[in-house]
Image: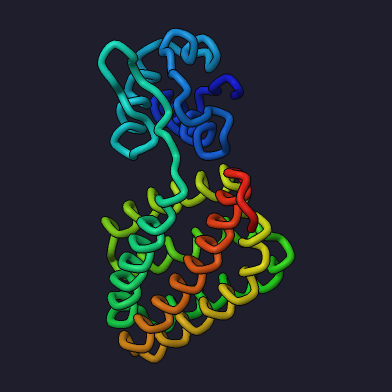
Amino acid sequence: MQQIQPVRSKNELVYASLRAAIIHGELEPGERLVIDELAAELGVSQIPVREALRQLEADGFVVSRPHVGATVTDIQASLITEIFGLLEAMEIISGRAACARLHETDWKDLERHLRSMDALLDDPDGWSAANVRFHQAICERAGTPLVQKMMDKALAHWDRLRSYYHLKDVFSQRVAEAHQQHWEMFDAIRRRDPAALEQIVRTHNQAALEAYVDYLEKHLRMEQGETP
């Protein structure tokens, strides 16, 4: 981890640094998080580290135990079902609100964003980052800030799971299909058709879940020495 530079508040920057380190596996599941050591590594006092750990615990990335202290939350493949269930529910809520509230300017902005994503189909990491911004934009314009905050957390846990289980190959294979479904979501929002939007979202998330669960089951069987 790099030392913190005072651009935003130290609390925000420490939180962002530790969160990224957990998501990308630099801080591994079960690893102890010693406040003194983290403060020295990041070049800050203990206070922002302590505050960041509290927030990360609230987000589900850190757990505190008596006589042990703070550790990075364990990660399990079964979490993927919960993540995609949450994403499906939140995308339906924000999408339904978008069908009712978005107007011409919003549609044009979302369309421009999707067209920029057209050029990222061979760049899974770039497309993934743009995908997060696409869903954030829908939440912002639909007036669903609570959904947006919860979706950001669910997507962060998904990024962590994807990194830990090396799901990039499966994700890369799904980008083109997922992107087409985003265009279909956009079309349903523009037509103000919440029923169609909900069906697309369910299909979108269930197809993704099935692909990842199939991969994870094979991966775990191989780890246990079973025949794929």
Location of residue 215 in the rendering, given as x and y in whole percent from the top left corner: 58, 59
Q: Number of callouts in the render?
A: 0
Residue shown at 55% from the left, 23% from the top: 5
Q: Which of the pair 202/215 is nearer the observer?
A: 215
Q: Is residue 140 visible?
A: no
Q: Where 156 sits versus 131, above or below? A: above
Q: Which of the pair 77/227 is nearer the observer?
A: 227
Question: Quarter-wise, where is residue 46 in the image?
Answer: top left
Left/right of residue 102 with respect to residue 209 in the rendered view: left
Q: Which of the pair 159/216 is nearer the observer?
A: 216
Residue shown at 33% from the left, 28% from the top: 63
Location of residue 198 in the rendering, given as x and y in whole percent from the top left corner: 35, 81
Residue shown at 31% from the left, 85% from the top: 194
Q: Which of the pair 78/100 is nearer the observer?
A: 78
Q: Is residue 13 visible?
A: yes
Left/right of residue 209 with respect to residue 218 in the rendered view: left
Location of residue 156 in the rendering, given as x and y in whole percent from the top left corner: 45, 47
Q: How is the image coloured?
A: rainbow
Residue reaching furthest to the front: 226
Q: Where 204 sits versus 188, above or below? A: above
Residue reaching furthest to the right: 122
Question: Quarter-wise, where is residue 141 in the image?
Answer: bottom left
Residue shown at 63% from the left, 69% from the top: 175
State the quadrant of the N terminus. top right
